[in-house]
Amino acid sequence: MPSLKDIRLRIQSVVSTRQITSAMKMVSAAKLRKTQDAIIKLRPYVNKMQEIVSEVTSTLHDEVDVPFIKPREHTKVLLVLVTSNRGLCGAFNSNLIRQMQQYVKEKYNYLYEQGNIHIYCIGKKGFDYLKNKPYKIFKSNTEIIENVTYSQATELANELMTLFEQETYSHIEFFYNKFKNAAVQIVTQEQFLPIPPPADTNKKKIEGYLKNYIFEPNEVEILTEILPASLRSQVYKILLDSVTAEHGARMTAMHKATDNATEMLYELRLNYNKARQAAITKEILEIVSGANALKG
């Protein structure tokens, strides 16, 4: 049985740990509140932009060549993996990486074996895990996820659009955690380029008209203008989603750690009191035995 001193030291250690986890929970909660408001306000805008692009795209003739839309054969794929720079956020990163590996195995195994699957690591944790694995790392960026801004997202989106336009990659896809609530993060695979076709392929196409709209000057010029803006806002939304999900995951993990520390403290204090009581009882028995021996 541990001595009273050992139990006291362990209680002090658990108390210090609980203070740290509780403070980290409060910090994550404050950051979550800020980013959650931002992502909730951003999503309707991005969804509407994508809806407009999808509807305008559905009116185009098949022979019209618009950048970022024309389908390509899968020859070389870039997967953009968005993880965190820090740990202590539960299974936030491990679930994402595991599902990305499963996705590559199921869909792109033949390209993976040929070395045509490249990973763009956004965040330190993804890079640290994959750098010693048989994956080709195209690039690593750990700064953009520290403080996500629209200008940084624009630079990343422009870089990816350039890679696609130069035909360096035939497809570019994102893997990230989508924020649902503080306790739930959804691992999401999202195709970035080429832009996927509209979900309703049987929609009636009327040249120049769609839902009582008239396109001026024409659909191609409109798409040429709004496509880059839509893609930049999509990247910004993905990064903000991931950061918000990270804060939620860390807050939940620290909340559970604080609760576990509280339960451990209860058990340790109970054991301490039992050990202290046993020591006192032992001392009393020794005194009584000594007194009885003197009487005898």
Image (tube, grey):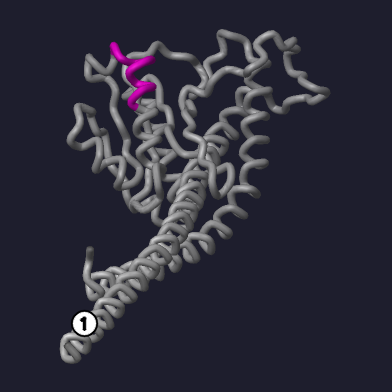
Residue 105 magenta-drawn? yes
Q: Which residues are the magenta region?
A: 101-110
In which quadrant will I find the C terminus? bottom left
Q: Residue at x 54, y 46 (%)?
A: 183
Q: Residue at x 45, y 66 (%)?
A: 22
Q: Nearer the viewer, residue 59 or 246?
A: 246
| Residue reaching furthest to the front | 296
Please, what is the three-letter code of the amino acid marked with disc 1?
A: Ser
Q: Does 218 sit left or right of 231 as displayed?
A: right
Q: Is residue 209 visible?
A: yes
Q: Vertical placement of 17 versus 204: above or below?
A: below
Q: Does 44 sit left or right of 185 as displayed?
A: right
In percent of width and height, residue 119 lies at 30, 31
Rendering quarter of residue 102: top left
In percent of width and height, residue 108 lies at 34, 16
| Residue reaching furthest to the right | 212
Q: Determine crowd level at label 1: few under 14, some 14-19, many 20+ residues with C-alpha closer than 10 A.
A: few
Q: Is residue 232 visible?
A: no
- At mark 1, the secondary structure is helix
In which quadrant will I find the N terminus? bottom left
Residue 102 magenta-drawn? yes
Q: Residue at x 40, y 26 (%)?
A: 172
Q: Vertical placement of 242 versus 148: above or below?
A: above
In percent of width and height, residue 294 lies at 16, 91
Which residue in the protein does label 1 denote?
A: 289
Prevailing secondary structure class for the magenta stretch in the rendered image = helix
Q: Nearer the viewer, residue 70 or 132?
A: 132
